[in-house]
Image (spheres, rainbow, N blue to C red):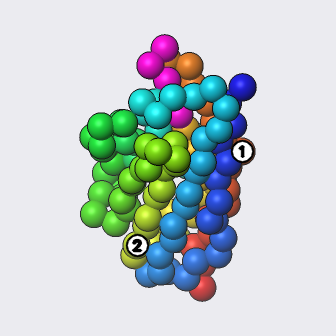
Amino acid sequence: QVQLVESGGGLVQPGGSLRLSCAASGTISSDSTMGWYRQAPGKERELVAIITSGGTTRYADSVKGRFTISRDNTKITVYLQGTTLKPEDTAVYYCNAVTRTYSVYWGQGTQVTVSS
């Protein structure tokens, strides 16, 4: 069984920053692709950023230049650093992992609210 546990959400002022963490545990290998998705109220879940075990990254256009995804393969942990946050970044952020055999796992989600 695989668990993804996120941490680091909360209330952020516009222009502020955030750092989310997601630790994977259970029967999951360090070569899984990991990433972050988000879902705002009334909207579909969307990709924020993903990172392969080799460090290749992909970002949504809306966060390019403001968010950085990174990972620690020894801990099977993925991070999301965001700067210059905007109210439209408000959403529940979900950690995601996809294994080499294309099994997909999700975290429980962490709320990020950008508001003054």
Residue 7 picture location, percent across and down: 65, 60
Element carrying mark 1: loop
For residue 2, the mark is: none
Whether residue 39 appears in this view of the structure is no
Considering every residue shown, the one lying at the far front of the view is 74
Element carrying mark 2: loop
Q: Name the amino acid, label 2.
A: Thr
**Quadrant in which residue 110 is drawn:** bottom right
Considering every residue shown, the one lying at the far top of the view is 101
| Horizontal arrangement in the rendering, residue 82 relative to residue 6 (left or right) | left
Q: Residue at x 51, y 71 (%)?
A: 18
Whether residue 61 appears in this view of the structure is yes
Q: Which residues are magenta?
A: 97-101
Residue 71 lies, with reference to residue 116, above or below; the image says: above
Quadrant the N terminus occupies: top right
Q: Residue at x 44, y 50 (%)?
A: 72
| Horizontal arrangement in the rendering, residue 74 relative to residue 58 (left or right) | right
- Number of residues whose C-alpha sits closer than 10 Å to that of mark 1, classed few (under 14), some (14–19) or many (20 or more): few
Q: Residue at x 27, y 63 (%)?
A: 65
Residue 37 picture location, percent across and down: 52, 45
For residue 83, the mark is: 2
Q: Name the amino acid, label 1.
A: Gln
- Number of residues whose C-alpha sits closer than 10 Å to that of mark 2, classed few (under 14), some (14–19) or many (20 or more): some
Say which residue label 1 marks.
Answer: 108
| Horizontal arrangement in the rendering, residue 112 relative to residue 63 (left or right) | right
Of residues 101 and 46, which is closer to you in this image? 101
Residue 26 picture location, percent across and down: 67, 32
- Tell me if residue 93 is in the magenta stretch: no
Q: Measure the C-alpha gap from mark 1 to mark 2.
A: 23 Å
Q: Main secondary structure of the magenta part?
A: loop
Q: How many marks?
A: 2
Considering every residue shown, the one lying at the far bottom of the view is 116
